[in-house]
Image (spheres, helix red, strand yellow):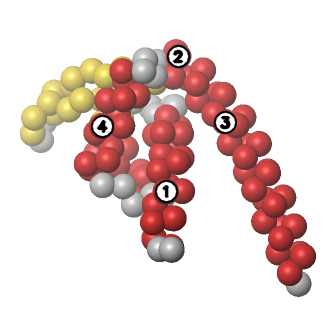
Amino acid sequence: MNIENTKAQMRKGVLEYCILSILKDKDKYASEILGALKDAKMLVVEGTIYPLLTRLKNAGLLNYRWEESTSGPPRKYYALTETGQLFLNELNGTWDELRNAVNLVTNTKQAATK
């Protein structure tokens, strides 16, 4: 079994949640979203993020607007919709439950092996 594949699958599992969280306070364009993910060590490539943004938009969780840029072509800024905010709120609760469950399991296993 390849540890890097397992790590990548774990990251992919939380990527939508992370993107929605990045957009919760401010509209951002794709490069800013990608930068925030990379800063957090999510190790995402551009080919992954654009289809995901489109899927989130098509699901009604995001919308976008074009904005002129002084340093190049217009930029597509993404924002959470009202539905996206409600979805994110639900995911926040689910994430807390999942994190607590994983912590219980991993702490129990660590204590049992000592």
Q: Is residue 1 above or below residue 11?
A: below
Q: Report the residue that reaches farthest toward the front.
A: 1
Q: Report the residue that reaches farthest toward the left.
A: 72
Residue 17 position, x and y percent, is 53, 39
Q: Earlier in the sequence, mark 4 or mark 1?
A: 1
Q: Write the residue at 36% across / 21% down.
A: 58
SS of the residue at dot 1?
A: helix
Asked if residue 76 lies left or right of residue 94, the reply is left
The residue beneath circle 2 is 83
How many angstroms separate mark 4 from mark 3 (CA)? 23 Å
How many angstroms separate mark 2 from mark 1 (CA)? 26 Å
Quick one: 39 or 43, which is closer to the camera? Answer: 43
Residue 49 position, x and y percent, is 33, 44
The residue beneath circle 1 is 9
Residue 74 position, x and y percent, is 14, 30
Q: Is residue 10 above or below residue 106?
A: above
Numbered tag placed on residue 102 in the rendering: none
The amino acid on which the numbered mark 1 sits, given as a three-letter code, is: Gln
